[in-house]
Image (tube, grey):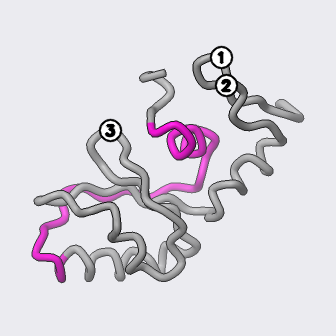
Amino acid sequence: MCDRIAIVDHGHLIALGTPAELIARLEAPHIIEFTSDPPMQAELWRELPGCHGMTPKDGAWMLRVDSLADAVPKLLAAIDHHGAKLVTLSTHAATLEDLFVSLTGRELRDA
């Protein structure tokens, strides 16, 4: 495994550090990806305690959260409150790919 990783976007260094240091830049250990109909506005994340930002990802939204147990029910309630329907929902631990998407707004394959 690597001791240090450099993340480069279009020839420019945008992040450098250990994998743990880089993932910590997301400010949250968990990711919630979801889609809704109609799509939610980016400001939704401000309504969710423990959420550190929302980034578009491949037609979905990626939320960076402290606790899945706290954030998922609040997200579902917020979607319902705004008159939308949940279409997809998945969760995972934060990764280096999530950091790249957060920093660039693009997935690695789009780079």
Circles 2 and 1, Cβ within 8 Å, touching? The answer is yes
Q: Residues within 10 Å of mark 1 (few under 14, many from 20)?
A: few
Farthest residue toward the right? 3
Picture mark count? 3
Residue 61: where, in percent of width, then height? Answer: 34, 53
Q: Quadrant of residue 88?
A: bottom left
**Disc 2 element:** strand
| Cα–Cα gap, marks 2 and 1 | 6 Å
Circles 3 and 2, Cβ within 8 Å, touching? The answer is no
Pointer 3 or 1: first along the chain: 1
| Left or right: 84, with 16 as reference point | left
Farthest residue toward the front? 12
Tell me the residue at 48%/82% (across/down): 49
Circles 3 and 1, Cβ within 8 Å, touching? The answer is no
Residue 100: where, in percent of width, then height? Answer: 57, 38
Q: Residues within 10 Å of mark 3 (few under 14, many from 20)?
A: few
Residue 28 position (above or below residue 94): below
Residue 50: where, in percent of width, then height? Answer: 54, 78
Q: Write the start and end of the magenta stretch as one range.
A: 80-105
**Disc 3 element:** loop
Nearer the observer, disc 3 or disc 1? 1
Residue 103 position (above or below residue 62): above
Which residue is under mark 2?
8
Residue type at numbered disc 2: Val
In the rendered image, the quadrant that contains the N terminus is top right
Which residue is under mark 1?
11
Residue type at numbered disc 3: Asp
Which residue is under mark 3?
58
| Cα–Cα gap, marks 3 and 1 | 23 Å
Q: Residues within 10 Å of mark 2 (few under 14, many from 20)?
A: few
Residue type at numbered disc 1: Gly
